[in-house]
Image (cartoon, helix red, strand yellow):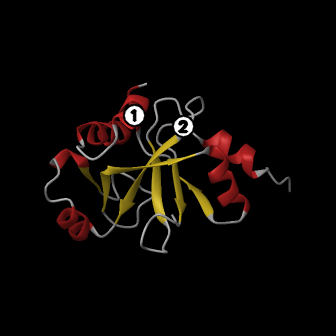
Amino acid sequence: MVRIPPDVQIKASIKAGSVYYFAEEALKSREPHYFIVINRDPLTDTVLLLVCASSQIQKVNKRRRGCPPETLVQVSTSQYSGFTRTSVIDCNVVFERSTSQLVEKLKNANLRIKAEMSISLVEQLRDGVLKSHQVAQRTKITLRG
């Protein structure tokens, strides 16, 4: 069996709606989370813009109660088959990562590539990020393309 190098796997998989499952050092939880790529053109952008899903919907809603409702996108298992339970994606926090950071995680077996998310859901996530009062303008500019 031919082993595909991690950099080739990541570069081949990156597009709007790509979903990666990994533990993120910037989160309090050590558990892996689902991260969704929302860039319009992630292969040419300098950074990947990722939003994170959580199955702890009530916790996220409580933490973000002052935020516009569009910034918290609830996704059911019928909308995205990669989820094992209904989850919320907090569009008030965007993680900026390089392709090489994802390659490194995959190389060390700390990342799994999951099924792609539909572009209609990705559009909702982008809209949520653009409506957020907590996301930096430069991130919104990158997102607009």
Q: Name the foreground residue: 68 vs 9.
A: 68
Which residue corresponds to the image point at 23% horizontal and 38% vertical from the top-left? 131
Q: Name the foreground residue: 111 vs 65.
A: 65
Which residue corresponds to the image point at 58% horizontal and 40% vertical from the top-left? 14
Looking at the rendered structure, the number of numbered marks drawn on it comes to 2
Q: Position of residue 142 (x, y in %)?
A: 43, 31
Q: Name the foreground residue: 26 vs 124.
A: 26
SS at badge 2:
loop
Q: CA distance from mark 1 to mark 2?
A: 20 Å
Is 48 on the left or on the right of 57, as rendered?
right
Residue 89 — which label?
none
Name which residue type carries label 2.
Answer: Lys
Which residue corresponds to the image point at 44% horizontal and 46% vertical from the top-left? 117
Query: On the image, numbered disc 1 is attached to which residue?
Result: 138
**Vertical relation: 96 (above or below) 26:** above
Q: Nearer the viewer, mark 1 or mark 2?
A: 1
**Vertical relation: 137 (above or below) 82:** above
**Vertical relation: 40 (above or below) 23:** above
Query: On the image, numbered disc 2 is attached to which residue?
Result: 15
Q: Position of residue 24 (x, y in %)?
A: 51, 64
What is the residue that sits farthest to the right in this orientation? Answer: 1
